[in-house]
Image (cartoon, coloured by chain):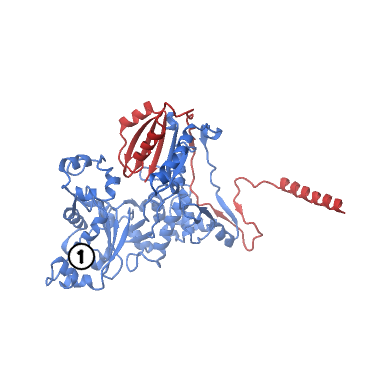
């Protein structure tokens, strides 16, 4: 509006102010006037009281700063950020600032845990993990510089600095660079809310080369590659894009930030690897960044899934297969129970090999599982309309999406078929929006379920 | 004695001010340094922060002298019509001399190009809000 010569003011939630300031800068109007509104309360309590401030923002004369036209040239970050002893550097990088929305001291350079200070020698050693020169700008597959927080760019050296800080080994560098290519650990910065923690899957030869865990407790602590790479993703978000609490999201946060591999040797025969699912060959090393909006672990009672395979026990009873030995599909029990959480959207399942095995005896490929999920579980449009996502995702049915597989846009589909028309729950337009990752060790109890689809994959080999 | 004390006190204060003014300013572009004398080897530590680029800054549009007789658009982006309709009604009730026009954007819905053209042609000012 301001660019068109129309005076304007924006209002938004108090905990989104930092996000707003960053967005205003990116839209060339860093002085954009802003009024805060509370999230909750009646209109009397939260909305009407801000009206005088809104009108004042439209009528108060501009300050000299607000009239400024020109180039905002931020100071280029110094190559060195601190000089001192090693111990002093640890304290320096532990610096915090008070973030009002968090009502807490929030770390500026770290995820809250100490880091390894990046000396020149350590960074130089880290750089031996790639053939690329330190000043190479990190770009995406189109050759465009990757922008963190939609603004800052980084070089290979910056990624190596993060690698040192996170405790990575030099041989992790290609994965670190692929991680940077995907924008680091944030899926929504600057953002307003609710992009959950990020899960990466390292697939192909690099996973074994650097020892990314795929088996017992692969989502847990203990494996240096898994843990330090996950920490690096967070440090990229924090340092590259300045994404600390208050700018990157406004909700409660998410505890899940993990880097894992798929247990390729224990995939059911015929099942695609993660890389193959994204069009790569098994010889290719790939990094997948999944996108989720919530998750839960569904843990079956000890032995429950084994009893199902024997045709005994409560789950066998529920599925109507008492007395009938397997293979049986445990997802048949789980899917209808998690389905109402997110309709018409991709879902991701992390399944331990022992649970995947009988599913693999029923479905020869992962894609066959996705098609079964997509075609079996449906909700009526009326069901969807009772779901909170309805308003947001479909703009209360008005959203004009791309043409779906039936040849209808969203709003045409709603109008044409009416409220009783059934839409898929697991996927919106394609079964391939779903993802299965096999791993987690020798138990037969756990299935992690994520609301949200499979995300994106990039080549790790490009960064070797 | 009291006079002498005052003279000494003033001299101390003046000396302090002189030292404070004469102290060299912090060197621009230099890395932060530890405040106390270091113990052990001193290193320089590399900066992990991303590299911001230049941004062309646009000045704000001149403000209105009054809202009376003006056409002001209220554009609210939210998941559902929770704030926009209330705000519009309140403004119409309390500022009847202004022509208030509300545009509601629900969820990630597309903006209507015709609505946008209309706004650009007719709006004297805009109140924009995001409440999701």
Q: What residue is drawn where x is 36% and y is 52%?
A: A195
Q: Is residue A20 left or right of residue A455?
A: right
Q: Is residue A372 left or right of residue A23?
A: left
- What is the secondary structure assignment of the residue under circle 1? loop
Q: Is residue A136 visible?
A: no
Q: Residues within 10 Å of mark 1 (few under 14, many from 20)?
A: many
Q: x, y (%) of residue B104?
A: 33, 38
Compared to residue B62, the image places residue A297 above or below, namely: below
Please state which of residues A201 and A290 is positioned toward the viewer in this rendering: A290
Q: Is residue B19 left or right of residue B99?
A: right
Q: Count the marks.
A: 1
Q: Quadrant of the N terminus of chain A?
A: top left
Q: Is residue A387 left or right of residue A33?
A: left
Farthest right residue in view: B1
Q: Is residue A414 visible?
A: yes
Q: What residue is drawn where x is 24% and y is 63%?
A: A267
Q: Which chain is blue?
A: A
Residue annotated with mark 1: A330
Please state which of residues A220 and A209 is positioned toward the viewer in this rendering: A220
Please state which of residues A264 and A55 is positioned toward the viewer in this rendering: A55
Q: x, y (%) of residue A89?
A: 57, 59
Q: Which chain is red?
A: B
Give the image quarter of residue A450: bottom left
Q: Chain of mark 1?
A: A
Q: What residue is drawn where x is 44% and y is 50%?
A: A132
Q: x, y (%) of residue A369?
A: 19, 58
Q: x, y (%) of residue A418?
A: 16, 43
Compared to residue A251, the image places residue A21 above or below, namely: above
């Amino acid at each position: 509006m301001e660019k068109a010569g129309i005076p304007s003011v924006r209002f938004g939630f108090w905990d989104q102010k930092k996000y707003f300031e960053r967005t205003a800068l990116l839209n060339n109007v860093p002085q954009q006037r802003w009024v805060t509104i509370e999230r909750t309360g009646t209109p009397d309590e939260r909305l009407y009281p801000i009206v005088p401030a809104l009108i004042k923002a439209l009528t108060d004369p501009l300050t000299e700063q607000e009239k400024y036209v020109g180039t905002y040239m931020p100071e280029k970050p110094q190559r060195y950020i601190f000089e001192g002893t090693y111990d002093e550097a640890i304290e320096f990088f532990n610096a915090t600032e008070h973030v009002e929305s968090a009502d807490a001291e929030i770390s500026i350079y770290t995820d809250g845990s100490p880091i390894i200070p990046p000396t020149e020698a350590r960074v130089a050693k880290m750089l031996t993990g790639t053939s690329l020169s330190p000043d190479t700008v990190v770009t995406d597959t189109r050759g465009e510089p990757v922008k963190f927080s939609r603004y800052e760019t980084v070089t290979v050296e910056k990624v190596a600095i993060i690698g040192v800080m996170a405790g990575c080994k030099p041989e992790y560098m290609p994965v670190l660079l692929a991680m940077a290519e995907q924008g680091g650990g944030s899926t929504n910065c600057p953002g307003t809310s609710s992009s959950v923690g990020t899960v990466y899957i390292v697939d192909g030869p690099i996973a074994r080369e650097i020892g990314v865990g795929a088996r017992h407790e692969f989502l847990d602590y203990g494996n240096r590659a898994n843990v330090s790479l996950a920490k690096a993703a967070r440090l990229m978000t924090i340092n590259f894009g300045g994404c600390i609490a208050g700018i990157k999201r406004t909700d409660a946060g998410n505890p899940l930030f993990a880097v894992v591999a798929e247990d390729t040797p224990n995939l059911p025969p015929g099942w695609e690897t993660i890389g193959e699912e994204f069009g790569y060959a098994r010889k290719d090393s790939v990094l997948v960044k999944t996108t989720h909006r919530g998750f839960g672990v569904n843990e079956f009672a000890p032995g429950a899934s084994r009893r199902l395979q024997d045709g005994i026990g409560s789950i066998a009873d529920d599925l109507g297969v008492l007395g009938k030995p397997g293979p049986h599909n445990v997802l048949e029990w789980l899917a209808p129970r998690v389905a109402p959480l997110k309709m018409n959207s991709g879902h991701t399942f992390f399944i331990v090999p022992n649970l995947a095995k009988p599913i693999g005896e029923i479905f020869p490929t992962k894609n066959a599982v996705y098609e079964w999920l997509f075609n079996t579980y449906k909700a009526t449009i009326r069901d969807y309309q009772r779901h909170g996502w309805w308003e947001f995702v479909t703009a209360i049915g008005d959203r004009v999406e791309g043409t779906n597989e039936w040849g209808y846009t969203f709003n045409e589909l709603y109008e044409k078929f009416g409220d009783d028309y059934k839409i898929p729950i697991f996927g919106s337009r394609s079964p391939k929006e779903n993802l299965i990752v096999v791993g987690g060790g020798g138990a037969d109890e756990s299935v992690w379920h994520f609301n949200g689809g499979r995300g994106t994959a990039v080549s790790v080999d490009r960064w070797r | 004695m009291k006079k002498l004390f005052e003279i000494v006190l003033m001299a101390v204060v003046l000396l302090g001010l002189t030292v404070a003014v004469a102290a060299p300013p912090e060197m621009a572009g230099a890395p932060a340094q530890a405040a106390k004398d270091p113990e052990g080897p001193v290193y320089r530590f590399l900066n992990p922060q991303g590299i911001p680029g230049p941004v062309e800054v646009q000045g704000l549009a001149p403000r209105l002298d009054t809202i009376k007789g003006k056409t002001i658009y209220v554009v609210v982006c939210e998941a559902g019509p929770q704030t926009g309709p209330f705000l519009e009604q309140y403004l119409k009730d309390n500022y009847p001399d202004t022509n208030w026009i509300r545009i509601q954007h629900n969820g990630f819905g597309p903006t209507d190009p015709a609505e946008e053209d209309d706004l650009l042609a007719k709006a004297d000012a805009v109140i924009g809000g995001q409440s999701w």
